[in-house]
Image (cartoon, coloured by chain):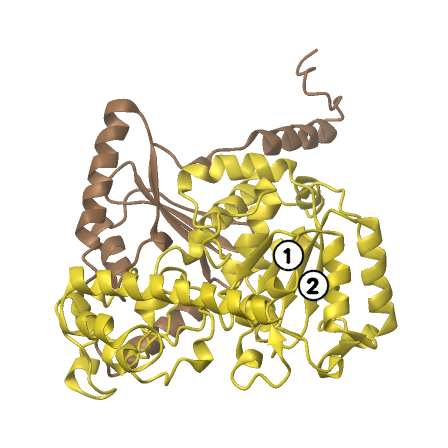
Chain colours: A yellow, B brown
Amino acid sequence: MRQADSRLIDYLRLQGISRRGFLKFCAAMTSAMALPPAMIPRVAAALEQARRPSVIWLPFQECTGCTESLTRAHGATLEQLIFEAISLDYQHTLQAAAGAAAEAARQEAMEANFGQYLLVVDGSVPLGNPGFCTIGGRSSVDLLTQAAKGAKAVIAVGTCASFGGIPMANPNPTQAVAVSDIIRDKPIVNVSGCPPIPVVITAVLTQLLTFGTLPELDFLGRPKVFYGESIHDRCYRRPFYERGQFAESFDDEGARKGWCLYKLGCKGPVTYNACATVKWNGGTSFPIEAGHGCIGCAEPGFWDRGGFYDAMSVTRWGSLKDLAIAAGAGAALGAAASALAYRKQAAAIRREKTSTQDET
Amino acid sequence: MNTHNSLAREALRSIAVKVELSSGNVEPLLHEIRHALAELLREGRGTVIDLKSLPLAAGEEERILQALGSGEIQASLNVFGASEILETAFPGVWVVTHRDEKAIVQGRFIEVTRCPQILCSQDPDIAAGLNRLCAFLEWPADPTRGGR
């Protein structure tokens, strides 16, 4: 375990990294955080003073896709550097072979950095039989509540940790819930997506590392900088939507010409994420660019909202009336209907949460 | 250079589906550069545009780079992978591309400036270099004692 007291700049110097290298790192991180390039000097100044935070990472009911997304996506050196810039004191998926020693490291790190460490969680938390997900004989709820007590902030990585995700899908056999359903007294950042875009995960860590503050969040607790606009808002196929040109099947003329995939089930209008700008695999592409509609994986309950290949007008993403208008009309009506559907979705989620809390 | 990224793009291009569209962002971006260049000349203030922040259709980034062309200076920086610093055919307009060690683009900026900051020697590096030179000359390392 490394104490969270060394400065990042000192660490980089020890690695033999020049000031130019540091500036390159800052430029890439500023871009990753979706900050304007004019912020690069401020990021550099803040990072010079930043101290390496201790991070405890708890994976619960998850497929390890979120961890894979971050650690295996393309092994970018700069992202690795962010990993090295934090003191990752515990990640029991990566430390599985260490067994009891890893658990002891977690305990030691939590005590040494009480009140200061970041808690990263991926996976949902089962409220049913604790045996659905135990680590070292302890239930997920127990581990989470104990770790959250000394955390400065909690980062829920992935749709499972953020909103319950696939484990919560009907009939929710494990009674899975999101981190925010259990932890109420700590700041929580939801980095949703199945999995989230790796650079979004690192950018949130970088924001905390750089400015010591949480990013501005939307009503679902997600960083607005990445989740502030819909996939549809930033989609390069949007001009076709506005002209009412839709692919009707995956091999028709419209599909070959790259027309809008709305009628093939694209959930871009009600999905808020950065796929259309940040993209995947080192900025190579994203599902819509590859010819497949967005499945809405960054949104709550995406698994239970009807077929991935059904247009929103026949699924549970919005009202038939509003969305039929979106498909048939053009830009202004479409954007308004999408926004309306999203507001209704938000209101529905709030109502669902309230009713769940009332029931419990 | 055969990089992972360029191989992936090449593979995508080979797919039969041809997207015939434009995000409509290429020409406005070139006008933004025009404004920035005029501002640099008039007020000496530089501008940096992050190309990754723009929604561009497939091939549009290449179109922008093609439109800007290449000028007299091409520099490279080797730290955390290669970075290319290229003055375009329009003096004062630079394209700075940061790649990681696997040659994947981590950031691409259009800088409208007289010289990108990353090309300039940096004070901490100058100080470290001075110390090394002093050691080589067996001269006291204190930089305030430059002569005797």
In this rendered view, identify the residue nearer to me: B3 or A7: A7
Task: Work out which quarter of the rendered image holds the N terminus of chain B and state it.
Answer: bottom left
Position of A324 with respect to A352 (left or right) is: left
In this rendered view, identify the residue nearer to me: A154 or A40: A154
Whether B75 is drawn above or below A199: the answer is above
Quarter of image, res B133: top right
The numbered mark at residue A184 is 1
User: Picture coordinates of residue A10 (x, y %)?
Assistant: 70, 40
Task: Work out which quarter of the rendered image holds the C terminus of chain B and state it.
Answer: top right
Question: In percent of the image, x 23 and y 42: which residue is there?
Answer: B32
Q: Is residue A279 visible?
A: no
Q: Secondary structure at mark 1?
A: loop
Residue highlighted by disc 2: A57
Whether A24 is drawn above or below B43: the answer is below
Position of A112 with respect to B86 (left or right) is: right
Dot 2: chain letter: A
- Circle nearer the N terminus (1, 2): 2
User: Picture coordinates of residue B87 (x, y %)?
Assistant: 32, 43
The three-letter amino acid code for the residue at tag 1 is Arg
Question: In percent of the image, x 72 and y 31: which residue is there?
Answer: B136
User: Picture coordinates of residue B89 (x, y %)?
Assistant: 24, 44
Dot 1: chain letter: A
